[in-house]
Structures are given as C-alpha cells and as structure tokens.
Image (tube, rainbow, N blue to C red):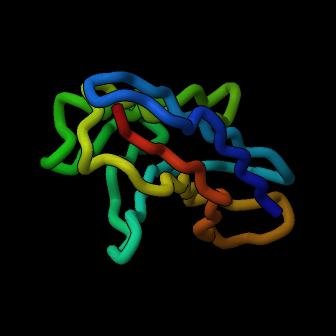
Amino acid sequence: QVQLVESGGGLVQPGGSLRLSCAASGSIFRINAMSWYRQAPGKQRELVASITSLGSTTVQDSVKGRLNIFRDNAKKTVYLQMNSLKPEDPAVYYCKVWARTITVGNFHDYWGQGTQVTVSS
C-alpha cells in the first residue's frame, strides 16, 4: 500500500504564499507521475499541476507563473509552491501519485486526504 500525507495548507491573505507538501510512504517500488488537484465547493476536482519522475511538469494555464510543482525523489515528496494567491484559489488540494508497490505488479493512482487552502483578508 501507499500512504500519502499532505501538509502546508491554511489561511493566507490575497497575494500571499503557501507551500504544500505530500510525502509518500509504504511498500513503494516506484513512483512515476506525482500531481496536485484541487476541488472548490460545488466544483469538480481539477488538475493543477503534475510532474514526471524525470522532472517534466505540466501546469494548468490559469495558475502558470503562480503555482509551481517540484519533487524530491529521495524523499518521495511532491511540493506545490503557491505564490500570489488569489480569491479563486481556495479549495481542498489533493496530491495523487501514480505508483507501483512491491507486492502489486501494476501501477495505480493513490490519493492523499486533502489539505484546505483558504485565501482571505
């Protein structure tokens, strides 16, 4: 199994910054893509950014230049650096990894429990 523990969410003023972290643990054989999604109240969950094991990134157009994804493979951790936060950014942010465990031969998606980001003055 793969466990994902997210941290770093909270309340921030407009224009402020937060860094979200998501650490993977368990009987992991390999992690390929790591991603951040978000879901605002009444809206569908949407992809914010993803990063491959080699560091290639994809970032949603609406957050480019403000939100950046990076990872530390040795720590099995993915980060989302959030700068210049706007009123439209509040949501529950979820990390997801595409991983294979030692015991299961195929890759599967594993999700974190989510961390709340609130932007308010």
Q: Is residue 40 above or below residue 121?
A: below
- Residue 84, by quadrant, is top left
Q: Nearer the viewer, residue 42 or 98?
A: 42
Residue drawn 44% across the image and 44% down it: 118
Left-right relation of 116 to 50: right
Residue drawn 24% across the image and 50% down it: 88
Q: Nearer the viewer, residue 113 or 13?
A: 13
Residue drawn 62% across the image and 63% down it: 111
Q: Is residue 70 above or below residue 104?
A: above
Which quadrant is home to the C terminus?
Answer: top left
Count of numbered labels shown in the rendering: 0
Residue drawn 42% across the image and 55% down it: 91
Q: At which x and y percent is residue 107? A: 62, 67
Q: Nearer the viewer, residue 61 or 16?
A: 16
List the single residue furthest toward the left: 61
Left-right relation of 25 to 99: right
Q: At which x and y percent is residue 30? A: 67, 49
- Residue 3, by quadrant, is bottom right
Q: At which x and y percent is residue 89? A: 31, 47
Q: At which x and y percent is residue 9? A: 56, 38
Which quadrant is home to the N terminus?
Answer: bottom right
